[in-house]
Amino acid sequence: AGAIRFENVRFAYDPEREILKGISFDVPAGSSVAIVGPSGAGKSTISRLLFRFYDTSSGQITIDGQNIAKVSQHSLRAAIGIVPQDTVLFNDSIAYNIAYGRPGATEAEVYRAAALAQIGNFIESLPDGYKTMVGERGLKLSGGEKQRVAIARTILKAPPILVLDEATSALDTHTEQEIQGALTLVSRERTTLTIAHRLSTIVDADEIIVLRAGEIAERGTHASLLAQR
Ligand code: ADP
Ligand code: ADP
């Protein structure tokens, strides 16, 4: 489940300037598509439209054949998990952060998600900046550790669709590679839309779409796109 289709999608934040100029692509259920392109090309706008933060100016977006304009915000959010570039943590334990919004999750499920994301060892710790009334300070989490918290949240949520929006772009190369491994684990057999600045950070997408100035400039596999360069 979770097939995504963009059909001739146009969008403008401001009517004077069109940001997406008729974009069409498919992410078949269970497959993985990456959108790459320079900053300002409109990549994040695509993910914002998928979440219906905005409506398209024309064209439509469907999930499993259903126009998202007719789907409730609640079911849309239930269907899509996101690992954003910067994960903002609540002022509470890592376990709380992973379980937030999942009242049905058992402690065992939260710990399993943490273990898979390789943060099982500090699940009871508190994020940086946390202060209790006696002024105790929390553990300082690195960017990679914060991303692992986001990954654990997604493992627990287990949505049919996963959106990775520059999920590793704020990390150093070594950490990026580690986090890529964890993301590959989460995205397996899930419909995945990856948004990235650089082609080199895409490891295993079934299709790569190069977006430039709101238009699809090229599309192909990793190998076919590299061969053209
Ligand atoms: P990318 O993710 O490829 O860097 P974005 O989708 O974030 O690009 O942005 C595409 C264009 O839309 C940019 O020129 C950006 O300045 C503009 N833009 C983004 N958000 C807004 C907004 N809320 N209002 C007006 N313009 C915006
Ligand atoms: P939820 O916990 O609400 O079911 P997620 O864990 O998948 O959903 O989302 C975590 C948070 O990321 C949510 O608060 C959501 O509003 C926010 N979010 C959604 N879309 C984006 C986006 N495109 N970029 C950054 N954050 C987003």
Image (tube, helix red, strand yellow):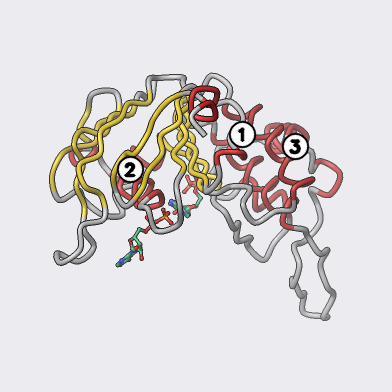
Task: Name the disc covering residue 39, or none.
Answer: none
Please report contact status of discs 1 and 3: CB closer than 8 Å, yes or no: no
The residue to which callout 1 is attached is 155
Figure check: 43 above or below 112: below
The residue to which callout 2 is attached is 50
Instruction: Tell me the SS state at disc 1.
Output: helix
- Coordinates of residue 110 in the picture (x, y in percent): 69, 38
**Residue at left offset 69%, top offset 61%:** 92
Q: How far apart are marks 2 and 1 (CA)?
A: 20 Å
Q: Distance between the residues labelled 1 and 3?
A: 11 Å
Q: Quadrant of residue 2?
A: top left
The residue to which callout 3 is attached is 111
- Coordinates of residue 206 in the picture (x, y in percent): 49, 21
Of badges 3 and 2, nearer the viewer stands: 2
Badge 3 local density, few (<14 within 10 Å), some, or many (20+)? many
Report the amino acid beneath label 2: Leu
Q: Distance between the residues labelled 3 and 2?
A: 30 Å
Badge 1 local density, few (<14 within 10 Å), some, or many (20+)? many
Foreground of the two, 206 or 226: 226
Instruction: Tell me the SS state at disc 2.
Output: helix
> In the figure, is residue 205 to the left or right of 40?
right
> In the figure, is residue 214 to the left or right of 120?
left
Instruction: Tell me the SS state at disc 3.
Output: helix
Q: Ligand 2 near label 1 (Cβ, under 8 Å)?
A: no
- Coordinates of residue 229 in the picture (x, y in percent): 52, 34
Report the amino acid beneath label 3: Tyr
